Image (cartoon, rainbow, N blue to C red):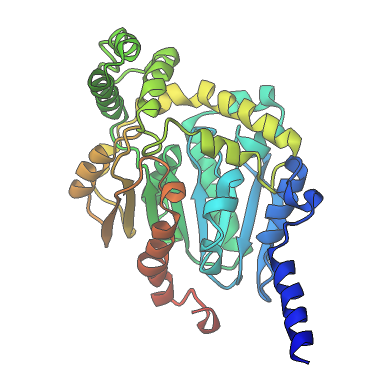
Amino acid sequence: MKALISAVLSIALAGLCMPAPASEAHGPHDRAEAVRIIGDLRKVVADNGVERLEAVRIGGIDQWVSIRGSDRRNPVLLMLHGGPGWVAMPTSWYFQRGWEEYFTVVQWDQRGAGKTYVDNDPAAVAPTMTRGRMVADAEEMVAWLRTEFGKEKIFVLGHSWGSYLGLELAQRRPEWLHAYIGIGQVTDAPESERRGWAWALRQAQHDGNAQAVAELEALAPYAQGNGPVPLDSLFKQRKWLNYYGGMVHNRRGGDAEAAAMKLSPEYSDLDVTGMWKGNDFSMQHLLADVLTLDMTTVREVDVPLFLFLGRHDHNVSSALAAEWFETVEAPRKQLVWFEQSAHEVMIEEPGKTLVTLVQEVRPIAERAGDVHPDAM
């Protein structure tokens, strides 16, 4: 009997150590298979969960949203992506899953971006690509979410360009918001550009990178005054700023994030192709104007204010945002530094982002009675 048991155990252990057949060991074999794997892994299966991907009529056109959460009674959190045109929906599969246990999270592809760009005629949309229209779209989206989920207030989180929209919402519709959270907060855009250029030049000089030094010095004087920065000059500045980790800390640019977008379960092959066209479209119509913004004139907001700032963010200067934060008044305000991040805080430090949202932000909704006792 002992011999039989020993033989059985030997076979079982050998099975545990055997490599998988070649057909199982290699894969996924294509984008479609990878997307299916990710989609199945993150499927919302909670009893009271919500998982929606749909177009909503906002500002006279169909605009796409992803709405996900483990309990529809949780507070709603709308994320306003950056760019303009740098959509967050296709990377949300990576950074957002934990959020969905504590919030109903809404990713929105704005006018001229992502799935919304693909779903509309660019020629018809182009005349509407203005800051005023984008702010109005954001107001409409918040109003729709409040009605759709029966919420008096929601949270709004703005990233980069989206932080401009979010701050405008906080000023215009404070009664609609539990709080405003800014990541990569836009403050004095021309000064941010100047500081970013000077930082990139210092890195290049220290590195002995003659090509970078020559290209950056050729831009001088860069971003003088408050006028628009020519896009070709901007792209040259960003080329070296990103190269030295000013966008993603200790990485040479956002290639990893861009690649991750191709794995989005929300995006078809057509959407992935259109996403990059939409990014270019949005930048051509909005970016020059965005770079003239000076939000340091905002001295008061009537909602709780949170800033999540990457210590190494030179794409949109976190140092400038911290300086502005000291001057602004709010019912409550909190600045959280992310010491291992640059501009893509939620991707670079997803754990700390989640913990901060749960421990510092969500309790505001709990105190307001916007969290069902069973979902606490």
User: Looking at this view, is 173 or 74 the one in front?
Assistant: 74
Compared to 79, does 237 lie above or below? Answer: above
Q: Quadrant of residue 344?
A: top left
Q: Specify whether 328 is left or right of 94.
A: left
Task: Say if residue 295 shows up in the picture.
Answer: yes
Q: Position of residue 360 (x, y in %)?
A: 35, 66
For this orientation, the residue located farthest to the front is 3
Q: Specify whether 99 is left or right of 209.
A: right
User: Looking at this view, is 148 or 31 the one in front?
Assistant: 31
Q: Quadrant of residue 357?
A: bottom left
Compared to 155, does 218 lie above or below? Answer: above
Q: Specify whether 358 is left or right of 272.
A: left
Q: Position of residue 141 (x, y in %)?
A: 57, 50
Compared to 110, does 76 lie above or below? Answer: below
Q: Residue sitting at 29 percent across and 35 percent down? A: 317
Q: Position of residue 87 (x, y in %)?
A: 56, 39
User: Looking at this view, is 179 or 201 the one in front?
Assistant: 201
For this orientation, the residue located farthest to the bottom is 1
Q: Residue sitting at 18 percent across and 48 percent down? A: 326
Q: Position of residue 30 (x, y in %)?
A: 75, 40
